[in-house]
Amino acid sequence: MQLRNLLLFFLFAGLLIGAYVARPYLFPPKPAPEQQEEAEVKPDPKPKSVEPKKGVDKPKDKPKPPDKETTKLEKKKGGKEATKARELVRRPLAEKKLIKLGSRDRNSPFHLQVVLDPPLAGVRSVLLNRFQQADERGLPVWDKDEEGKKSARPLMLVPPEANLSQPSHLLYHYGSADSNHPLDTLGQHQPRTPEPWKLVQKVVTEEDPNNSGRKRQRVSFQAETPEVLITKTYTLAEGEYHLGLEIKLERRTVGTNEVRFRYQLTGAQGLPVEGKWYTGTFRNALIGRVDGRNSVNRDLQDLRQVGHGEGGEEILRQGDYFLRYAGVAVQYFASVIVVDSDQPDQKFLRQARPTLERGILKGRFKGLDPKTRTITLVLEDKTTETLLVPDRFLGKFMGVPPEVDVAIVYRFDSYDPISKTTPRVALDVRGGAERDATHALWEDDVTVRVSTDEVVLTTEPVVHRYLLYNGPVKVSQLRQLKLDEALIARYHDDLRLDTLTDYQSPGWPGKIASSIYFTALLIKCTNLMHWVLGVLHQWVPNFGLCIVLLTVLVRGMMFPLSRKQAITGIKMQALAPEIKKLGEKYKDDRQALGAAQMELYRKNGVNPLGTCWMLFLQMPIFMGLYYALQESILFRLAPFWPTWVDNLGAPDMLFSWSKSIPMISRDSDFGSFLYLGPYVNILPVVAVVLMLGQQKMMTPPPADEQQAMQQKMMKYMMVVMGLMFYKVAAGLCLYFIASSLWGFAERQLLPKKKTEGATPDTGPTPGTSSNGTARAEPAPRMALPAPSSSTAITASAPPSGVVKEPTGVGRGKKSARNKRRGGGGREVPVAPPAPETRVGKFRQWLRVRRERLSEWWANVLEQARKK
């Protein structure tokens, strides 16, 4: 009955998990109307010092609203200028024209190297020099110098190849107060057009006013709109994992009329996904709101949700909660826009929304139109899609024959006010096996865009300050790098970046877990695992051995409970024949059978639910270690020397069995239940085999065919669980293996089960207390005779009043062990049983309460049977 209920529980839990995973597909979020957060293509009126394009009206003394001017121009020109702009893709600048802050050197006091794109005042790349790069397989990447020596390649968190045409952290402004689409004039730069941003202050090195004795680098850019002068200033200080950004807004015109201004700031793009064949965390959007008490309300939108809706849900400032941060996170790292807490006004952001920057379309290629630079694709749902092709990528599509199934990699262009759509720009085409191996989770890229309220500009400038955080998603892990404690406290407590990880899961499961405080317990256990592993690593340099020591420490602390669980299992095995007889006796009355079984358990001091304690007690620890391995930058790329494991945070990857096995390792089968990846992982197999052996050792023999079937089902479920956990981290497999080996050793130290001559416990016997433990008597007594057919374990005095003492053995544990084994020696009288001294008052209280609970349950079953 209990196994059947357990099976039903696992089935119900699996259905809930499956429903939650399929939620974005069954109930996709409604995309914002007309891709609200995309930049709109509208020519911005140029200042008098800049010569406008040919055919575009010069701005008058009193300029008209940009929206009206753009509408007039589109009607006059037919939108040709906008279409021409979308046909071009900005060519990357030469390396010498880029601006660099920080250093690539690992030993530099700067922890970041940031490359800026001057014409757009955006971020081309961000490098973390103290972390090593990992490839898409999850293996470390090495560089070689001229002498052939290997060195760790630094981690490129914001890669340059994903930010060539559109760098990260661009600024767009809105043309009018009621506009839903920002103008793209400050975020677009084509050949033969003026640069929208000018370098007004080159890189200078100065004393950091916030950190005495440390240096910081600073650079500034300026851009103009008809009425506002915008200054973007980037700062990078030594020892910090954020890039400071200051946006200064000044009024250009003099007058009494109000000048209102709104802008949009984009997030980072192209964060790399490590180990894409095994990870379950891709590019997720995180948006956090705080109130006056610094309490956090965090929203997480995963890549599936954002990609399916071609844009995520808009998060607004609401009530007392205002936007604190918004960014993108992968498994170990994050790039986040954070509103600086060290400024008078922190509530200037109105909204934040994840947007899809790059995606894929699969369908049948219909052809290329060289005149309009467009291709036509018939999608799998029979709809037709037209994509623009930039001149740079035109050659990739020239030789594609029609009526061929292809996958198109595209990015979104700026919003088109004529068609009121957001056109797609084709970047690459893939056919054949490469098409099948292309997946949205691997190709889709998201960012988060934040928009401000209207700023009323007077004679005084308005300044907004941000922190562009680029570092571990678990900010407390920075303590392992010996970072300044005050800086960590600022990240963790003041800016509340701890909630990037330490927060409840999204949806109703997370709300339920949080309401019963399971989330808080899990966060405490996870942080405790981080701390313990960090302390162990100070003494043991190998992280694999740290995990083994952690397992021994945890199982050692739980030894009293696990021992009691094992003894309960032994007693239940001894009671199996009696249970079988009860099953035959009450085979037609399930209620009477349950009552009789509970009575048998009560008389023999067995709690059938006692074996579940260890499972529930270990669950927070197991889950805490699982999340610790998923978050820890210490286990990332940490080898387990001298084994083949190069990354304890990834599967062990003993050897590759290729990507050509159908349903198993092909990239086209990624996402299916049977997909195991291109590597043979031996540690999960060893862990499952050991758990099966431990299950067989602890499971009593079946009393009937139903129990035998249930035990077979449990074995099959263990195999299924092995398939599900085939791609878990090697460090977690080490925990399973060490825990199972501990269980085997612990089982050998327990008394063997009796199969003959045991009697059911019919109550307190002479020499025992009511709970079956030995108690003091004035003189040794003989045990009462019992039926020989019973196999239950009883705690009674020796039958003869004498016992053999092993010869030549003194006192201590060895003497006691020989006595239990019945070693030879002289016969001595049995001493009166010593009073119980090892069982404390608390354990005694628990035992009494358990017996009362068992009696109450037996009475409930008896009353139900009578009714």
Image (cartoon, rainbow, N blue to C red):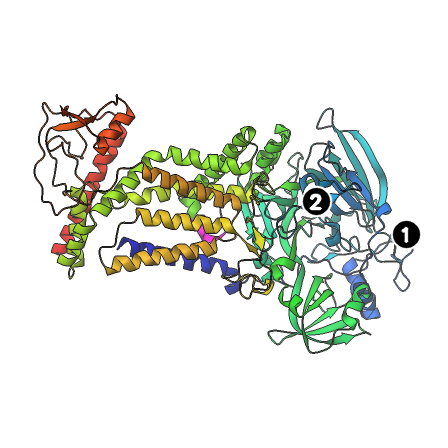
Most foreground residue, 847 or 57: 847
**Residue 460 percent across, percent down from the top left:** 77, 38
Q: Secondary structure at mark 2?
A: strand
Percent coordinates x, y for residue 825 in the rendering: 19, 26
Place residue 165 in its image quadrant: bottom right
Residue under numbered circle 2? 142
The answer to whether residue 340 is seen in the rendering is: yes
Which residue is under mark 1? 48
Q: Residues within 10 Å of mark 2 (few under 14, many from 20)?
A: some
- Can residue 321 be seen in this snapshot? no
Closer to the chain start, of discs 2 and 1, is 1
For residue 722, side relative to residue 766 (left or right): right
Q: Nearer the viewer, residue 30 or 239?
A: 239
Question: Which residues fall within the magenta stretch?
Answer: 505-512
Question: Tag 1, which secondary structure?
Answer: loop
Quarter occupied by the N terminus: bottom left
Q: Amino acid at mark 2?
A: Trp
